[in-house]
Amino acid sequence: MLAEYAQFVAWMCQDSGDLAAALRWYDRSHAWALEAGDASLAATTLNMKAHQAWSLKDPQRCVRLAEASRWHDGRTSLGVQGMAAQMSARGHAQMGEANQARTRLGEAEELIRRAAEHPDDEPAWMYFYGEHWFLMQRGMAELELGEGRRAAELIERGLSGLPESYRRDRAWFGACLARAHAVEGDAEAAVTVAVATAPDAAAVNPYAMTELRATEHALAEAGARVAAEAVGDALAALGSPDQPGEV
């Protein structure tokens, strides 16, 4: 129980931008999980540290931590193994290694499919991690690889199954969808999604605000000046909270 709470505290620290405190709590959670003999929780904390490394644009460390999580394979749930595979994929994608990324994503998809057949075998903290969530994670990997159209299709499909009550998460993935449209060259769709996402991003998710700023910049770099200004105006009207990075 201590290890579970430590993991949750770490996530709250990361979400609020205190990354040093997050790392300390992830380390505590990992140590306590090992002491308690809970391989799935120990592996999960490594996955979350991989996520933090990805957020800090340290893809090599992201891959190393995700692969370290897989050292526990055979003693962890299929869902936890799938999370490790997709985190490794995101690290490879951030390095531009498309083949490695898609190979890992294929492994993750199979693991998550098998996990869905036996949901009672998954630990309680994996409640959110299913097919729709994985589609969006796969879309984020494609976005890292510069495949805007493919990313947009995957994120849209995933968002269709994400409950409206997941307001913070919908803001983040909505912002990713807006940038995917910008990358694929669909300025009109990028503006439509960005403007619709902006209120929730401003209210509950500063990470999403950062991603919407990236959408604005992507549009400007592509020469879509009017579209970039429309996104910038929508964000300016809502204010600009602290921007801690990516999630």
Image: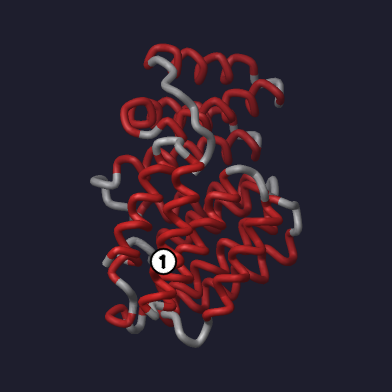
101 sits to left or right of 242: right
Residue at (31%, 78%) from the top-left corner?
Answer: 119
Q: Residues within 10 Å of mark 1 (few under 14, many from 20)?
A: some
Tell me if residue 93 comes above or below residue 14 in the rendering. below
| Most foreground residue, 13 or 28 | 28
179 sits to left or right of 147: left
Q: Amino acid at mark 1?
A: Glu
Residue 160 x %, y %: 36, 52
Residue at (34%, 76%) from the top-left corner?
Answer: 122
| Most foreground residue, 30 or 168 | 30
Residue at (66%, 21%) from the top-left corner?
Answer: 220
Residue 131 x %, y %: 41, 66
- Give the colour scheme shown: secondary structure
User: What is the total number of numbered labels drawn onto the structure image?
Assistant: 1
Q: Which residue is mark 1?
A: 131
Tell me if residue 160 comes above or below residue 246 in the rendering. below
Q: In what quadrant of the picture does the N terminus appear?
A: bottom left
Residue 155 x %, y %: 48, 50
Residue 189 in sight here: no
Residue 27 x %, y %: 48, 58
Residue at (55%, 14%) from the top-left corner?
Answer: 229
Residue 227 in sight here: yes
Tell me if residue 96 comes above or below residue 132 in the rendering. above
Tell me if residue 185 comes above or below residue 239 in the rendering. below
